[in-house]
Image: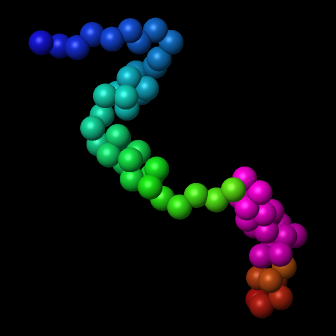
Amino acid sequence: MAKVAKVVGLDLEQVELGTSAKFWKLARAWRKEKTISRAELERRLASEQPGGKAARRKKLTA
């Protein structure tokens, strides 16, 4: 017997992912990974921007 669900507003990819055992296995693994705060994310991204600390370090050592 097939399952029937309301999928109004969802595209094909969303429906396929929502029913994919492989996707949910990956999602469970992602949820167990260590997280960082938004402030830490922004700090890391800023340091990777041209002119940021990481860029200056690379320029000095090149």
Vertical placement of residue 1 versus 50, above or below: above
Q: Is residue 7 magenta?
A: no
Residues 10 and 31: in front is 31
Q: Which residue is at 64% across, 59% downward? A: 36
Quadrant of the rendering where the C terminus is positioned: bottom right
Q: Main secondary structure of the magenta part?
A: helix
User: In the shown orientation, is residue 3 left or right of residue 41?
Assistant: left
Q: Which residue is at 80% across, 83% downward? A: 57
Vertical placement of residue 14 versus 2, above or below: below
Q: Is residue 48 magenta?
A: yes
User: What is the x, y in percent for residue 60?
Assistant: 83, 88
- Residue 26 appears in the rendering: yes
Picture quarter containing residue 44? bottom right
Vertical placement of residue 33 versus 18, above or below: below
Q: Which residue is at 87% across, 70% downward? A: 51
Question: What count of labels does the image hold?
Answer: 0
User: What is the x, y in percent for residue 61?
Assistant: 77, 91
Vertical placement of residue 40 versus 38, above or below: below
User: In the shown orientation, is residue 27 left or right of residue 47?
Assistant: left
User: In the shown orientation, is residue 53 left or right of residue 17?
Assistant: right
Q: Which residue is at 46% across, 8% downward? A: 8
- Residue 45 appears in the rendering: no
User: What is the x, y in percent for residue 56?
Assistant: 84, 79
Picture quarter containing residue 3? top left
Quadrant of the rendering where the N terminus is positioned: top left
Bounds of the magenta segment: 38-55
Q: How is the image coloured?
A: rainbow
User: What is the x, y in percent for residue 7?
Assistant: 41, 12
Considering every residue shown, the one lying at the far left of the view is: 1
